[in-house]
Amino acid sequence: MFGRKKGASDDAMKLDIKRTLFVGFGFMGIMCFWEVYDYIMPLILNRVFGLNATAYGVIMGLDNLLAIFLLPLFGHLSDRYTKAKYGRRTTFIVTGTVLAVAGMIVMIVVENLQFLKVMEASIESPQALIDKGYLSADVWTAQVQQLWERVQGGAKLSGEELRIYNDFLTSFNQAQTDMANAVMRANPAIIGGFIATLLVVLIAMSSYRSPAIALMPDVTPKPLRSQANALITLMGGAGGLASIVLYTVLAKKRYQSHIALFCTLGGVMLLMLLGFILTVRENKFVQMRMDEEAKWGVVDEEEATGNAPLAKEKRVSLVLILATVFLWFMGWNAIKSHLSTYATNVLKFDDGFVGIINILNGAGGAIALLPVALMAAKWGRKKTILAGVVIAVAAFVPCIFLNDGINAVALKIAFTACFLIAGFGLVIINVNTLPMVTELAKGSNVGQYTGYYYVASMTAQAITPMIGGAIMDAVPRQYKSVIFIYGIICIALAFVTMFFTRHGDNKPEKKKKVIEYFGEED
């Protein structure tokens, strides 16, 4: 796809790290929101509103269903918005962030109304649940009462006592869900208001996701986009890490108000937006990219053909790349969207430890940054993605066999290690698939092609939480690890579609020093 003028060095073009990191502030705010949303929202819907896995899976898929239509639309609109004073992408990023934060605060205030009513029903008291008919008195034996009192006092159980207590918790948690569901049904206006405000937030988030992601290829020459996307992913990971710390500190209890968490989240998102506004000069950065390409003689053959459609073989590759994106999101999001409820209800982890798992999963992505840049430059994007698929599948296989019958410490270590390694593999896939899509785009329609990428990813994320929830609802507790089998199959199929992809790759470069993959800051 690319040619260079005679005399231009093959390794002369280098990534502007500072410029790329500044652009990453937009994506950082996005990931900050979604990390909290993916973790907290299933717990809110399950514990506060009393929805089962299938029902909350449908709602968790709403954002992705909306995104199927909205991300390409807003990506295309940002392509067309060329007369914006501060840049065609910047306008959407600023407006979308402000609207999302405002809607989010209203949403959580509405949720708090339901929370207060649930707490009025004494949902944390086993005896209250028995008195109201939600919990069988047969499970509240003298031995269980004694174990309950010991746990409330901070004691740690093990062996047969832990098994008995966990069996009781399964019944107790279900009774709490049933009571919360009854409270919800008695107050339909609250759930209606919650869904309405949630839709406002999701639309606002969708309005600037494609423009924020499209800004990276706007300001980065095509040969350097895998490395740039690795840095952008690192920024997103930092935003996600900030959110994990937030909900680990501010959402420790099974039942508590989430107002403080979401207000703090909104403040953090606005700070990240401020960082973006103060550092990014979109129009200047785009011109700098064009000057760099002209300087080093990068010739974009697709751009030279004007509005001509992609050749047939490139369209086939585009479809295969999007299929790869679809399949790996089908697998990963099925596991991710049910992780908090699976880990707490099935493996009996406390909420705080689930936050630690997510922190380490994000750490796996951060660790992958340098290897991703090196692998993509040395092997090409396609081979790097195939390696990432193998790593992710291998990491998730042991999760099928992990259960609460294993020593508690060993279980936590093994489960966490699996997610750490899987995070490494999945970020390798994620960092390289978007550049493969935008590699086939023209400068004038990068936002549109970014929208295609998100159609594939969000379609998967719209349907897979519901499918995963239905699978988990259909099997007994001891077989709920089937969610990992489903996820593994989907991710493994992504290997097949990527294997047959022929276009969108970058050409492996000649051997360089490590620092040269990123360049030096001016």
Image (cartoon, rainbow, N blue to C red):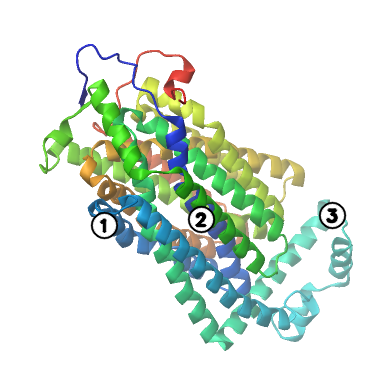
State the residue in front, 505 or 12. 12
The disc labelled 1 sits on which kind of residue?
Leu
Q: Which residue is mark 3?
A: 157
In contact (CB < 8 Å): disc 3 and disc 2: no
SS at circle 1:
helix
Q: Secondary structure at mark 3?
A: loop
The residue pinned by badge 1 equals 77
Q: Do residues under tags 3 and 1 come within 8 Å of each other at their CB atoms?
A: no
Say above or below: 379 vs 288: above
Residue 47 percent across, percent down from the top left: 63, 70
- Place of residue 217 in the rendered image (x, y in percent of width and height, measured from the top left): 33, 39
Q: Camera-side residue: 494 or 441?
A: 441
Kindly identify the amino acid type of the residue bearing the numbered disc 2: Trp
Sequence-wise first label, 3 or 1: 1
The answer to whether residue 414 is above or below residue 293 is below
Where disc 2 sits, the SS reads helix
- Disc nearest the viewer among 2 and 1: 1
**How would you rate the neighbour count of disc 1 (Cα within 10 Å): few for under 14, some for 14-19, many for 20 or more?**
some
Position of 162 with respect to 334 (left or right) is right
Q: Which residue is mark 2?
A: 34
Query: In x, y percent, where is residue 59?
Result: 46, 68
Q: Is residue 450 above or below residue 128?
A: above
Is residue 293 positioned above or below 139 on the image?
A: above
Q: Is residue 273 found left or right of 435 in the rendered image?
A: right
Q: Quadrant of residue 183?
A: bottom right
